[in-house]
Image: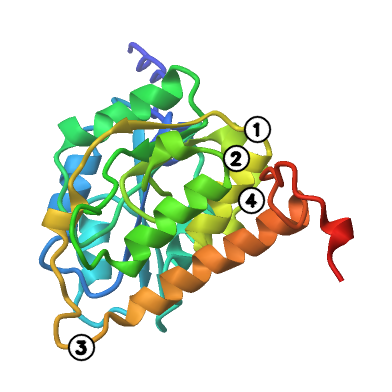
Amino acid sequence: MLKPKARSPRVIKPSSDQTVPTVSVIIPAMNERRTIASVIRQARGVHPSTEIIVVVNGSRDGTEQIARRMGARVFAYPEPLGHDVGRGIGAGHARGSILLFIDADIVIKARDLKPFVRAVERGVDVALNSYTGNIHKQDVHPVVLAKHALNLALSRPDLLGASMTAIPHALSRRALEVIGTAALSVPPLAQTIAVTKGLDLHKVHEVNVGRMNPRKRRTFRVDPLRNLIVGDHLEAIGYLLEATNERGQQTDLFRDRSFVG
């Protein structure tokens, strides 16, 4: 009687959780069940080696369950965490060498996300959306003015109103280590750290998020985020003054203050 042949050991392919991805796409989400699946679907197409990280906070509409069904790594919190806090949390869990930040309520085609990833692959540390906001009108939005003012203070007039406040934008792993995850919750501060620390920061591609924004806050006479974001820019200016001098390294020309009083 022939003995049965010994079975070869079963080969188990490593799951995506065991494979280090090249790109980590970070998506904060709060009650975005209508768009989250489409956002994830587009994000997955930015690179062959991509992980999707969804930070769900304060959601009651099934956003978390949809994200999990879509295969995302989900980090869920029952309470709202505050504006942009999810970026820092997602970055802290990211494994990729490139971090791409988008929002759960704006569906951006993969073809418009890829340029940010490619820019970091080419050596850029911070790849910004070239969209700068509308300044060619009488009443310019305070947030748009704040973005332009910060870049002027940083001696980067070439950036105009491009900002880490806006999505999409991407970071290198080096940039994340220099900026730190906590600062990502205050995007203008993160941008100021990036510039003052000498990171390579550039506008790379325009996505008109102003036109795409769903405008959820129309019921308010004043956008409740407006003052918060302007305050973020003031915090960034404060950091700049502490890191440089009282004029943010801007010239005093030939002013001789010794003759005054």
Residue at x 43% of width, y 61% of height? 146
- 244, above or below 206, in the image: below
Query: Residue 223: percent from the left, percent from the top?
Result: 27, 80
Residue at x 45% of width, y 58% of height? 87
Residue under label 2, please give it. 195
Q: Are marks 2 and 1 in contact (CB under 8 Å)?
A: yes
The reply to whether residue 196 is in sight is yes
Distance Cα–Cα, label 4 vs label 1: 15 Å
Residue type pointed to by label 3: Arg
Distance Cα–Cα, label 3 vs label 2: 35 Å
Residue under label 1, please give it. 198
| Mark 1, other Cα within 10 Å: few <14 / some 14–19 / many ≥20 | few
Pair 3/4: label in front:
3
Residue at x 39% of width, y 29% of height? 12
The reply to whether residue 24 is in sight is no
Residue under label 3, please give it. 221
Instruction: Please identify the quadrant where the C terminus is shown.
Output: bottom right
Residue type pointed to by label 1: Gly
Q: Are marks 3 and 2 in contact (CB under 8 Å)?
A: no
Residue under label 4, please give it. 180
Query: Residue 190: percent from the left, percent from the top?
Result: 56, 52
* Closer to the camera in the image, 222 or 38: 222
Looking at marks 3 and 2 on the same chain, the residue that comes earlier in the sequence is marked by 2
Residue type pointed to by label 2: Val
Looking at marks 4 and 2 on the same chain, the residue that comes earlier in the sequence is marked by 4
Distance Cα–Cα, label 4 vs label 2: 14 Å
Residue at x 51% of width, y 56% of height? 188
Q: Quadrant of residue 25?
A: top left
Distance Cα–Cα, label 3 vs label 4: 35 Å
The outermost residue toward the top is 2
